[in-house]
Image (cartoon, rainbow, N blue to C red):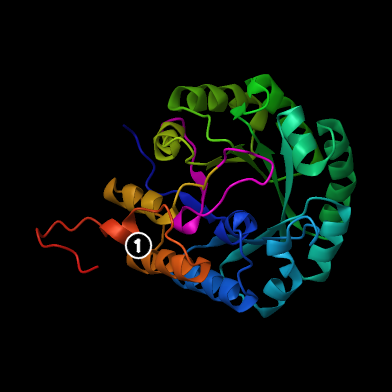
Amino acid sequence: MNFPKSVTIVEVGPRDGFQSEPLFVATDKKVELIERLSEAGVKRIEITSFVSPEAVPQLSDSELVAARLPKKPGTSYSALTPNLRGLERAIRAGMADIALFVSASETHNQKNVRMSIEESLRAFRQMARKALNGGLRMRGYVATAFGCEYEGRVLPKQVERIVTEYIAMGISEVSLGDTTGMANPLAVREMIRSLKPVLGQTALALHFHDTRGTGIANVLAAIEEGAQIFDCSIGGLGGCPASRTSSGNIATEDLVGMLHEMGIDTGIDLDALIECARYAARITGRQLPGRLPNAGRINWNGTAPDL
């Protein structure tokens, strides 16, 4: 296999992870986790969402997180902006990178943001103009890109329609989300091959949830199709409030551990990353699904790791 020498990891735990936690995680602890991730070498971190505090109280401290976070040079800090009001809050908070979010499934989009897909895209066109005029970089998420628990299989043409709209808005990167964990390696290959002619110079990222244990297998299939940007969540935090079955994302430490064993560089210190996952477990007060914090990294010296 002709694997890449390196891939880019986008850490989404502070947003996608904490939004699904049953208890509010204190602002200072959120900030410390983000700092630890940055110190471990993670160069792209999604730190929060400027969503309505009433809708997602776990992220009601978005402005505080953005204000208290010491920005490390060379690290990109982004935030989800679900609507124009959220975008305006993100701009006031000094965010330089934002993300838009729409589902490929009509039912899921209605349950998630109470709008049709077309209504979401119409609002994003206005937001995109404002963001570009302000010099912001934009990413476009396509949720339920591989399947929806309400509507079943999602076809590539449904995703292609949204990607085409995003590109026309001026986004620099598309992230395909397997929000309900229904993807498999073959479906991933077919989706990427279908979208390549549409993407052109627009970057492609993949965002896999590990609901049914296929997350890392899907990453491998995507790498074999040329993908080099992957979203993941420290400790395997995550889920989706609009989904009945969605569980956490791929654990960042597990993915980075596999990639390093394959000789694919991420620029991340794996030992420091494992400590980040252990810290995430402490501040959420529960055992997280990531495996390396318990198993330890592979030790080729034949001695048991010190856990």
Residue carrying label 1: 270
The residue nearer to you, when weighing 47 against 113, is: 113
User: In the rendered image, which quarter contains the C terminus?
Assistant: bottom left
Q: Decide whether residue 229 is among the magenta residues.
A: yes
Secondary structure beneath dot 1 equals helix
Residue located at (38% from left, 69% from top): 275
Residue located at (51% from left, 71% from top): 283
Mark 1 surroundings: few (<14), some (14-19) or many (≥20) residues within 10 A = many
Query: Image quarter for residue 202?
Result: top right
Secondary structure, magenta segment, majority class = loop
Q: Using residue 175 as the reference point, say whether residue 98 is left or right of it.
A: right
Can residue 154 be seen in the rendering of this structure?
Answer: no
User: In the rendered image, which quarter contains the N terminus?
Assistant: top left
Identify the amino acid type marked 1. Leu
Q: What span is in magenta?
A: 224-246
Q: Where is residue 75 in the image (x, y as percent from the top left)?
A: 57, 66
Q: Decide whether residue 267 is among the magenta residues.
A: no
Can residue 58 be seen in the rendering of this structure?
Answer: yes
Q: Using residue 271 as the reference point, say whether residue 11 is left or right of it.
A: right
Residue located at (88% from left, 43% from top): 123
